[in-house]
Amino acid sequence: METFYTDLLCIGAGLAGERVAVEAATRGFETICLSIVPPRRSHSSAAQGGMQASLGNCCKGEGDCPDVHFSDTVKGSDWGCDQEVARMFAETAPIAVREMAHWGIPWNRVVAGKSTYFKGGKEFEKIESKEKEGLITARDFGGTAKWRTCYTSDGTGHTLLFTMDNQVVKLGVSVHDRVEATALIHDGETCIGAVARCLKTGKLRVYLAKATLIATGGYGRLYRETTNAVICDGSGSILALNTGIVPIGNPEAVQFHPTGIVPTNILVTEGCRGDGGTLKDVNGERFMHIYEPEKQELASRDVVSRWMTHHIRKGLGVKSAYGDHLWLDIRHLGAKHIKTKLREVEEICNEFLGVDPITQMIPVRPCQHYSMGGVRTNKDGAAYGLKGLFSAGEAACWDMHGLNRLGGNSLAETIVAGRIVGQKVSDFLEGYEVDFKTAIIGDAVKKEQERIDAVIRGRDGRENVYEVRAAMQDALMEGVGIFRNAEDLRKAVEKLQTIAERSEKAGLRSSGIGANPELALALRIKGMVRLALCVAYAAEQRTESRGCHSREDFKERNDRDWLKRTLATWKEGDTLPTLNYEPNSKVWEIPPGERGYGSCQIICCEDPDVMGCGPASPATN
Ligand SMILES: Cc1cc2nc3c(=O)[nH]c(=O)nc-3n(C[C@H](O)[C@H](O)[C@H](O)COP(=O)(O)OP(=O)(O)OC[C@H]3O[C@@H](n4cnc5c(N)ncnc54)[C@H](O)[C@@H]3O)c2cc1C
């Protein structure tokens, strides 16, 4: 058995995993990153629109500062976030953007003089001053009071990830790609690494580490219609869930993005609406201003997705062979803007739709996009329940997003959290020694080997793993989508419980030897269905509407009873997760109030400790 020893094991080499690795390596700790794909192919690379940080350089960002960014983030989260974390995040984001510039990111810059822009379909002129010329500029994004989203055209994730990976290479961090962690090694108190499978040879390996980080990205692939890459199946959350100890925070907090293209669900960036693109219905009419007179197309994602679904339900969607959709119109932005600032959008539309966005409208509809839920950590990124285990990025519930993430806040989170958690992991490693107990390692490997052998031999059955996955994806799409209600959620939970039984009997059609994607999925499917059950069951239990979690039968945001974060764990032998709750935030800088967009029915919080601080309704303009 190949065994590797290291100080820090990063499971995941996207932006978050690599940023933590960079910090630890800079502090002199030996670090290994694991990744299913070569790091530069991680999902972070697909992010187009940008990264939020309150630089206040461009004229539309004037007066911006971490306070305003913090306030936007808290409102965006619908008061579901940990405000201490959101504060740390907003304060650090400008440093992170400048640091990335120092490492080589070709951020778009302020160009002095007049230029034409659009808002709410109307043209306006903006004039950038000479003094700001050459500073990092920003674009408009949903749910923000100021233009704060820094970008490199619409390839921001790409440039960030490649630049981060250059740092990883420079610092000599070992990257083992095409290696999948399948189980954490722990004794119920301390985590000492992971068992992993080489996806080229199929052989198991042992990684022993003083600290282990889960940075495996989101769990969008639990849903059928998602913008997420095929590797975003929540394997990090599954690693945590399988310990029976480490909870998943707010698994029900699943974001739908308004503009996935139909039918492939490839995302066209929020930058399209930020730059002035409009949403139109079957009659070619704009509609967002009817529902959201103030923010219009630039309300937060949960709000825009809901109004789009509502408008389609009113019969104003465009019929297609793939279901009803709406239009995104960016034609008025003009060829020059599209060809420079929205290049990937143009390419995606031409290549995948045969639509030229310079002259034609783009068919869009909301689809799953982001997982706010994930491995629950404290503000240092330390996972609950196991010493030596950390998490960062989309895989984590750190929790600065609460029940809805703002566009551009996720790229920023990966790098900001990567930086902060990287420092905390390094502090933890300073002088820390751990006993790599042979018996625990042996047990973990034996269990994994037996699991693999059982699937290959079909010991427990030969359920078709692709059919099981499709059934799970359908159950979540049908019952746990944008609008939710008790009846649909109950049915989804029941269906998923039956699917969970099938997942225990997953077998193979292929031989199972060597590089075998069917085996990889068969090994993961039980965990995926359990995670799906966490999503559905937690959604069923949360009897209120907050952020992306919209209950048709409980329309109010219930601050009296639900200023709480769900903590889901799974006890072996159970058929449902165990749900516990904790307060959203220990610190209340901004007490719950109105978001300023979205319909707002609130059952007020009666706790004087929560309501007695800060301004009642945060001012952001
Ligand atoms: C299409 C799209 C566009 C987006 N655009 C924006 C945007 O403009 N702005 C913004 O702020 N956010 C955007 N987001 C969100 C943002 O890109 C992601 O949240 C973020 O990049 C996630 O980074 P990460 O490092 O947490 O995970 P990822 O980049 O997903 O990396 C996960 C890593 O974990 C590895 N991995 C997974 N499982 C295992 C395992 N079991 N063992 C070993 N390795 C494993 C993978 O190989 C990969 O290296 C977008 C998301 C999508 C889907």
Image (cartoon, rainbow, N blue to C red):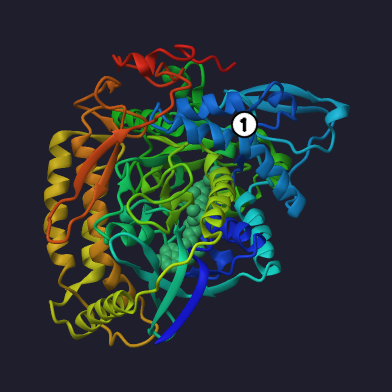
- Residue, x 44% and y 55% (percent of image)? 390
Residue 280 visible in the shown view: no
Which part of the image, by quadrant, shows the N terminus? bottom left
Residue 270, quarter of picture = top right
Q: What amino acid type is highlighted by mark number 1?
A: Asp
- Residue, x 55% and y 53% (percent of image)? 427
Name the side, left or right, on which 107 lies relative to 429.
right
The residue carrying mark 1 has its beta carbon less than 8 Å from ligand 1: no
Q: Does 572 appear above or below 484?
A: below
Classify mark 1: residues with Cα within 10 Å, few (<14), some (14-19) or many (20+).
many
Which part of the image, by quadrant, shows the C terminus? top right
**Badge count:** 1
Q: Judge by depth and name the residue closer to the eye, 428 or 561.
A: 428
Q: Judge by depth and name the residue closer to the eye, 482 or 259.
A: 482
Residue 125, quarter of picture = top right
Q: Which residue lies furthest to the right in this view?
A: 130
Residue 325, quarter of picture = top left
Q: Does 275 appear above or below 417?
A: above
Residue 199 visible in the shown view: yes
Q: Judge by depth and name the residue closer to the eye, 295 or 242.
A: 242
Q: Position of residue 206 (x, y in %)?
A: 40, 78
- Residue, x 21% and y 54% (percent of image)? 570
In the structure shown, which secondary structural element does the residue marked by tag 1 occupy? Answer: loop
- Residue, x 61% and y 30% (percent of image)? 276
Q: Where is residue 324 in the image (x, y as percent from the top left)?
A: 34, 41
Q: Name the residue under label 1.
A: 140
Q: Position of residue 447 (x, y in %)?
A: 24, 77
Q: Position of residue 292 (x, y in %)?
A: 45, 19
